């Protein structure tokens, strides 16, 4: 895909839509506050951090907390970050705090990592930071993620905890993958093509419940519920599934990356969003499992560019 040249127009996002997104983001802050208050108030673990995490992953509802307003926050943050100026830098900071704050309140290491990757990618390609800054940021990120892990499990941060966390992230996913049986899904493609089960189920047209995106835990050889990105393809379609969907993902990412290389602003922002999906493939699949969320985000991100392309809200 990267060997082809594509027609690219350097369209800037519509300012009116950007401003609308910003004020919608501000107006939706109470929704996150309400979520945090309810989670802590109704929690039963005695650990406020674990209560927040349990609510975020839907421990009682079997459905993760994935609010639409967080997609707005993320899209708006990217739209402002790509064109940060002396005039709008305060908005960039506010939006960045919202995106990071959601990750912290939901006690999600992945969402905190996502904020880091989004920010570093855009700042690096804009030449605001160097490789040295990135390395310092990675060190700070590691400390923060260790801290989140320790708070969630109410343990003291020490050398053994750090070592356990490293072992968990470096070794656990492949060890867990080794426990899987190919072609063992209850329904055809239920993990890889979860969206085709989720939509009819939500609309009441099917009684086949979509698989939970929070995968089942195993406790030997290591306690984990991550199986690498190969999990859905292997479980649904075996070894052929891994090959076929690797080609599909590689083709898609190659196409988006090439459009970014050609200077398309929309694809630059969308590739920044995709970077976290690529970085975390060692951990699990986040592309097909959350395809509905990615589609919503892409549409939300594209609206300001669509408005500019078709000269909406412009005086004739």
Image (cartoon, rainbow, N blue to C red):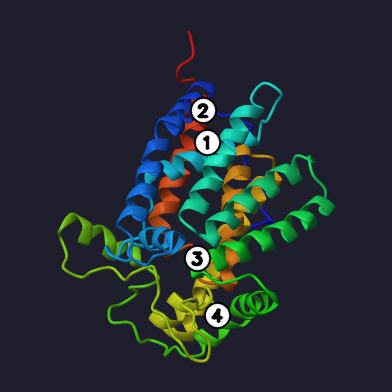
Neighbour tally class for label 1: few under 14, some 14-19, many 20 plus, Cα within 10 Å: many
Q: Which mark is residue 18?
A: 2
Q: Which mark is residue 173?
A: 4
Please say if the residues under marks 2 and 1 sit with CB atoms less than 8 Å apart: yes
Which tag, 2 or 3, sits closer to the chain's start? Answer: 2
Gap in Å between the C-alphas at discs 3 and 1? 29 Å
Which tag, 3 or 4, sits closer to the chain's start? Answer: 3
Percent across and percent down for residue 220 are 48, 91
Gap in Å between the C-alphas at discs 2 and 1? 7 Å
Say which residue label 3 marks. 152
Neighbour tally class for label 3: few under 14, some 14-19, many 20 plus, Cα within 10 Å: some
Residue 299 shown left or right of residue 203 in the figure: right
Residue 163 shown left or right of residue 98 in the figure: right
Name the one closer to the observer, 238 or 157: 157
Regarding mark 4 in the picture, which secondary structure is present there? helix
Which tag, 2 or 1, sits closer to the chain's start? Answer: 2
Neighbour tally class for label 4: few under 14, some 14-19, many 20 plus, Cα within 10 Å: many
């Amino acid at each position: 895909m990267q060997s082809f040249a594509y027609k690219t127009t350097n369209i800037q996002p519509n300012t009116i839509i950007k401003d609308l997104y910003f004020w919608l983001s501000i107006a939706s802050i109470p929704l996150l506050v309400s979520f945090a208050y309810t989670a802590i108030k109704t929690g039963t673990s005695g650990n406020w951090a674990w209560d927040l995490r349990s609510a975020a992953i839907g421990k009682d509802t079997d459905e993760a907390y994935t609010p639409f307003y967080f997609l707005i926050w993320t899209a708006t943050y990217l739209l402002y970050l790509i064109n940060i100026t002396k005039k709008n830098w305060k908005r960039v900071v506010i939006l960045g705090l919202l995106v990071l704050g959601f990750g912290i309140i939901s006690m999600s290491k992945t969402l905190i990592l996502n904020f880091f990757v989004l920010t570093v990618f855009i700042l690096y390609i804009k030449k605001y930071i160097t490789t040295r800054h990135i390395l310092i940021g990675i060190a700070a990120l590691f400390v923060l993620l260790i801290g989140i892990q320790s708070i969630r499990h109410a343990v003291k941060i020490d050398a053994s905890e750090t070592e356990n966390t490293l072992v968990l992230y470096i070794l656990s996913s492949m060890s867990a993958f080794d426990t899987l049986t190919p072609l063992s899904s209850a329904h055809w493609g239920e993990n890889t093509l979860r969206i085709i089960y989720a939509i009819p189920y939500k609309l009441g047209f099917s009684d086949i419940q979509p698989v939970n995106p929070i995968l089942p835990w195993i406790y030997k050889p290591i306690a984990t519920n991550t199986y690498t990105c190969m999990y859905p393809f292997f479980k649904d379609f075996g070894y052929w599934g891994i090959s076929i969907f690797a080609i599909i993902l590689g083709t898609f990412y190659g196409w988006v990356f090439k459009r970014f290389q050609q200077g398309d602003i929309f694809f630059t922002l969308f590739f920044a969003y995709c970077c976290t999906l690529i970085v975390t493939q060692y951990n699990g699949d986040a592309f097909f499992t959350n395809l509905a969320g990615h589609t919503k985000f892409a549409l939300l991100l594209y609206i300001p560019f669509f408005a500019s392309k078709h000269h909406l809200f412009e005086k004739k």
